[in-house]
Amino acid sequence: MKNTLKINHANHTIVMDRTFARNANDTRSEEYAHLQAIRRDYPNYTVVQRHIRINSNKNTYAGLTYEYMESYILTHGTEETRMTNFKAYQEMRIIAQCQGKAFRYPVIKSWFLEQYPEIARFGMTETEIAIEDEKAAIMNAVPSAQEQQAA
């Protein structure tokens, strides 16, 4: 049994994840027996299934692969800019090999979108672009904590 229950004493709940709930449906499973034992120990607690919160404001870039980034770098900008950015990209890819897999792509993607902001705006409507510009202007107008301490 890899999935376990968690007891939230503050909310009087017994929290289980989706896999545990699915396995507990089988009355012959270890999960079912474990759930019943916990329910006997805490009869006034409510059993709930944990749900992962989804960030609806998250920006996703489907198709933004390493191959696409390389191709885009080599075909956009002046010759000097292309070579400079491609060398920087290759260096980042080499350095990223030392990092965990979870950190490799996000760092390179952030750098790429910083170098080529038009990719982040691809497919956006004019209204969405205006809203993004307004957010950026507000963020740039608000002083950071370091700037506030310096003042």
Image (cartoon, rainbow, N blue to C red):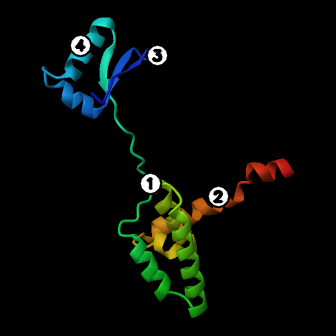
Tag 4: Cα neighbours inside 10 Å, few (<14), some, or many (≥20)? Answer: some
In this rendering, which labeled residue sits more in front, label 4 or label 2? 4
Residue position marked by numbered label 3 in the rendering = 10
Residue position marked by numbered label 2 in the rendering = 138
Q: Is residue 31 above or below residue 77?
A: above
Query: Would residue 113 be seen by someone viewing this image from the given angle?
Result: no
- Find residue 142 and report its image quarter: bottom right
In this rendering, which labeled residue sits more in front, label 3 or label 4? 4
In terms of sequence position, does the residue under pointer 1 or pointer 3 come before the other?
3
Which percent across, then down, holds residue 40? 27, 6
Q: Is residue 121 above or below residue 33?
A: below
Tag 3: Cα neighbours inside 10 Å, few (<14), some, or many (≥20)? Answer: few
In terms of sequence position, does the residue under pointer 3 or pointer 2 come before the other?
3
Closer to the camera in the image, 38 or 146:
38
Residue position marked by numbered label 4 in the rendering = 36
Q: Tell me how far mark 3 sits from mark 2, CA to CA.
A: 39 Å
Which percent across, then down, holds residue 79? 56, 93
Which percent across, then down, holds residue 66? 42, 72
Q: Tell me how far mark 4 sits from mark 1, CA to CA.
A: 39 Å
